[in-house]
Image: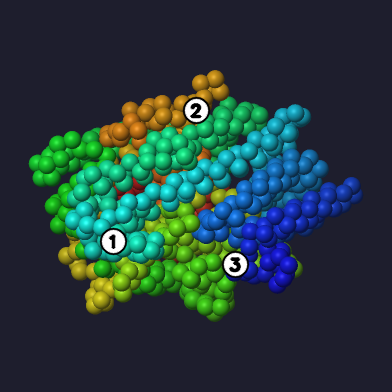
């Protein structure tokens, strides 16, 4: 190990316990200087312009930076601190500036173009050709053709956007951690099941107090909004959660993202125009499956036309039930989850609390591993000699049929302070074979489930199970790649509206009886999920499918219109555009003080800007892909069918971005995707 700075040690895995904020700046400065020197060397006049001399050195340089930055970025998400923030932001700005500097390097662009123009280009492998083609596209999207002062302005915009993205995310995390409500009288938690109260007791214990602590962490919000009879408590939690980082709510103005949203939108539009696009949507679609804004709008509006009438009927039924059975005559936003759960229990005699004992997290993990062993022939074996950032984290070797370790995964599943909410998969190491040595892929898999409490294992809701399967779907896309070039292997380089295909595909197994038998077992008795309970769960699968779908469509249309219709004179008009999207799609309108966009990290601090529609676009692909497995089951065979699993692995997971996603889908399915597959998956066909 590099004792002076562990981030400069190019080890197989990061030494998390050795990394300190003081390491970040010197490591990044050193690596950026090395990168500049390396690029200067390969663009020296007279230097060879073949794949091995131009493309592979760039991959090596980028991987060296990624090895240092990946653990730092991950710690910023899962173990945040003031000291880390102070160095993280400036380092990220340097990295962004360097990436744009490289993207605007005309000598390097000419070298890559020479590789593409060489007579032997056609003889390169599919992945090698894709790497060159993607690089040329990315040069154009980095402004390589711009002249001054536009070139410098484009770089300045990129750096500022990077800074604003980090600030936006930090504000949401701070606002989430800032609010809590202590409860000492258990009667105030009437309706909340024991498992939920145990979580709230655990939060209080962590803060050194007695009683219960309601927070804005997802397990707390979910249990209160779904089960608490105390309507005032539900309203306060909704108010605090839905106004995070805004000009409203209990911390109005303190963490406000309003100005950041305005600035982000203006800069994105300006950058797109500098590149010759009409708006940020057109720029976004340059790297997606969808070819034009009209295609996306038609897709969203067609779905809305089918889903909205269903959602309207569902809402009428819910209002009537709330009034007649719950004595709630004016159904408000903070009543919806509560009333919906009561109605679901009445219609299907299904209580989420009945299911949770059958989803103990350790058993679910083992069952998931058993499932992928049958599908893909791989095994995941825990290791206890790997340096991790928190005692809850586990590391697994991913092993093939021959016993070879070919990948690895860190798994961090419990909510805690200093860890941003949600669930995600990220890259620790990418597969890379540069002929000198081979680097195996390693993934970070992160969730925010309620932790074990009072002698019980963590008990998951069925939605939690689907979330876990979703993130592991992303993980296997990364881990099972056979492409040896990081920039086009695994999830990297895959069109953003197709990248959710493997993740949403995995969710389908969470509804299948055969798959459930691998992991749905009572935490005390080991009894499998009873058939009668499974049938009720299946019957309730599409409960309020219309309401769910219009909500997703509202988010997607808001994001798309916000970027498509941006006007530099009028500004972002964030709340106005949100109302426009809601008027077109929503059936339930929240209070005027709700500030959903201010915590919408997917589009303001993530990779889904002008692309949130991708979840629905990819869900169509995933539903149709799972149909291949269902067809085997209809023929009396197992839905966990190894031959089909191997084909899915070979044609979808293994190829990364070495070919367009639509070609990979057709290679697996034998035809183009059928649009009705998405409607069938929601029970709306």
- Nearer mark to the viewer, of 3 and 2: 3
Point 57% across, 65% down: residue = 442
Q: Position of residue 340 (x, y in %)?
A: 21, 47
How many labels sit on residues? 3
Tell me which numbered mark, 3 or 1, is placed earlier along the sequence.
3
- Percent position of residue 175, x then y: 44, 46
In this rendering, does residue 485 appear at all? no
Task: Report the residue at 36% width, 45% height from top.
Answer: 241
CB of mark 3 within 8 Å of CB of mark 2? no
Q: Nearer the viewer, residue 168 or 53?
A: 168
* Residue 211 disc label: 1
- Relative to 308, is 540 above or below? below
Q: Is residue 360 above or below residue 124?
A: below
Q: Quadrant of the N terminus?
A: bottom right
* Element assignment for label 2: loop
Packing grade of label 1 (10 A; few <14, some 14-19, many >=20) is some
Residue 124 relative to residue 465: left or right: right
Q: Can residue 216 be spotted in the picture?
A: yes
Residue 136: x and y, percent? 70, 43
Answer with the quarter of the image where residue 513 lies: bottom left
* Residue highlighted by disc 3: 16
Q: Is residue 332 left or right of 282 when viewed as pictured?
A: left
> Circle 2: is it few (<14), some (14-19), or many (20+) Cα within 10 Å?
many
The quarter of the displayed image where residue 510 is located? bottom left
- Location of the C terminus by quadrant is top left
Helix, strand, or loop for circle 3? helix
Residue corresponding to mark 2: 572
């Amino acid at each position: 190990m590099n004792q002076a700075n562990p981030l400069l040690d190019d080890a197989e895995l990061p030494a998390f316990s050795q990394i300190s904020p003081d390491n970040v700046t010197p490591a990044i400065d050193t690596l950026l200087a090395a990168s500049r020197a390396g690029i200067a060397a390969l663009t020296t006049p007279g230097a060879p312009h073949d794949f091995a001399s131009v493309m592979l050195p760039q991959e090596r340089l980028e991987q060296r930076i990624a090895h240092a930055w990946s653990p730092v970025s991950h710690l910023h998400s899962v173990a945040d601190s003031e000291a880390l923030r102070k160095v993280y932001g400036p380092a990220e700005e340097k990295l962004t500036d360097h990436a744009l500097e490289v993207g605007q390097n005309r000598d390097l662009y000419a070298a890559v173009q020479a590789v593409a123009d060489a007579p032997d280009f056609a003889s390169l492998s599919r992945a090698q050709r894709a790497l060159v083609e993607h690089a040329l596209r990315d040069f154009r999207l980095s402004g390589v053709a711009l002249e001054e002062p536009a070139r410098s302005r484009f770089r300045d915009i990129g750096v500022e956007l990077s800074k604003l993205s980090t600030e936006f995310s930090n504000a949401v995390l701070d606002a989430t951690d800032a609010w809590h409500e202590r409860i000492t009288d258990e009667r105030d938690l009437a309706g909340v099941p024991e498992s939920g109260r145990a979580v709230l007791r655990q939060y209080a214990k962590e803060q050194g107090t007695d009683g219960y602590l309601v927070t804005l962490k997802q397990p707390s919000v979910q249990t209160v909004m779904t089960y608490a009879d105390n309507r005032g408590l539900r309203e306060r939690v909704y108010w605090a959660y839905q106004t995070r980082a805004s000009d409203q709510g209990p911390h109005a103005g303190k963490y406000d993202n309003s100005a950041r949203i305005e600035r982000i939108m203006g800069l994105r539009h300006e950058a797109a125009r500098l590149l010759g696009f009409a708006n940020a949507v057109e720029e976004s679609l340059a790297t997606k499956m969808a070819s034009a804004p009209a295609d996306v709008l038609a897709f969203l509006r067609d779905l809305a036309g089918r889903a909205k009438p269903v959602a309207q009927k569902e809402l009428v039924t819910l209002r009537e039930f709330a009034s007649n059975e719950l004595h709630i005559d004016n159904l408000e936003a903070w009543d919806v989850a509560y009333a919906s759960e009561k109605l679901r229990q009445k219609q299907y005699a299904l209580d989420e609390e009945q299911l949770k004992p059958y989803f103990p997290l350790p058993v679910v993990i083992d069952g998931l591993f058993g499932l992928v062993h049958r599908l893909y022939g791989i095994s995941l074996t825990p290791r206890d000699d790997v340096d991790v950032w928190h005692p809850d984290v586990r590391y697994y070797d991913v092993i093939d049929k021959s016993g070879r370790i070919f990948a690895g995964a860190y798994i961090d599943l419990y909510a805690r302070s200093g860890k941003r909410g949600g669930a995600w998969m990220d890259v620790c190491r990418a597969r890379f074979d540069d002929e000198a040595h081979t680097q195996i892929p390693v993934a970070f898999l992160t969730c925010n489930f309620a932790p074990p409490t009072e002698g019980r294992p963590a008990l998951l809701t069925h939605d939690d199970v689907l979330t876990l399967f979703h993130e592991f779907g992303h993980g296997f896309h990364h881990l099972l790649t056979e492409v040896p070039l990081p920039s086009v292997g695994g999830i990297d380089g895959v069109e953003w509206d197709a990248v959710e295909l493997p993740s949403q595909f995995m969710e389908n197994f969470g509804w299948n009886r055969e798959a459930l038998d691998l992991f749905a077992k009572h935490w005390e008795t080991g009894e499998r999920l009873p058939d009668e309970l499974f049938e009720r769960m299946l019957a309730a699968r599409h409960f309020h499918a219309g309401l769910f779908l219009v909500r997703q469509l509202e988010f997607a249309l808001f994001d798309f219109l916000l970027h498509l219709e941006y006007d530099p004179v009028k500004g972002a008009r964030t709340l106005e555009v949100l109302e426009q999207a809601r008027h077109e799609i929503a059936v339930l309108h929240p209070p005027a003080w709700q500030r959903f966009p201010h915590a919408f990290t997917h589009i303001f601090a993530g990779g889904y800007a002008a692309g949130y529609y991708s979840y629905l676009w990819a869900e169509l692909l995933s539903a149709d892909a799972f149909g291949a497995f269902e067809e085997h089951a209809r023929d009396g065979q197992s839905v966990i069918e190894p031959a089909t699993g191997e084909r899915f692995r070979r044609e979808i997971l293994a190829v990364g971005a070495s070919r367009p996603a639509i070609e990979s889908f057709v290679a697996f399915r034998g035809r183009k995707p059928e649009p009705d597959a998405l409607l069938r998956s929601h029970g709306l066909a």
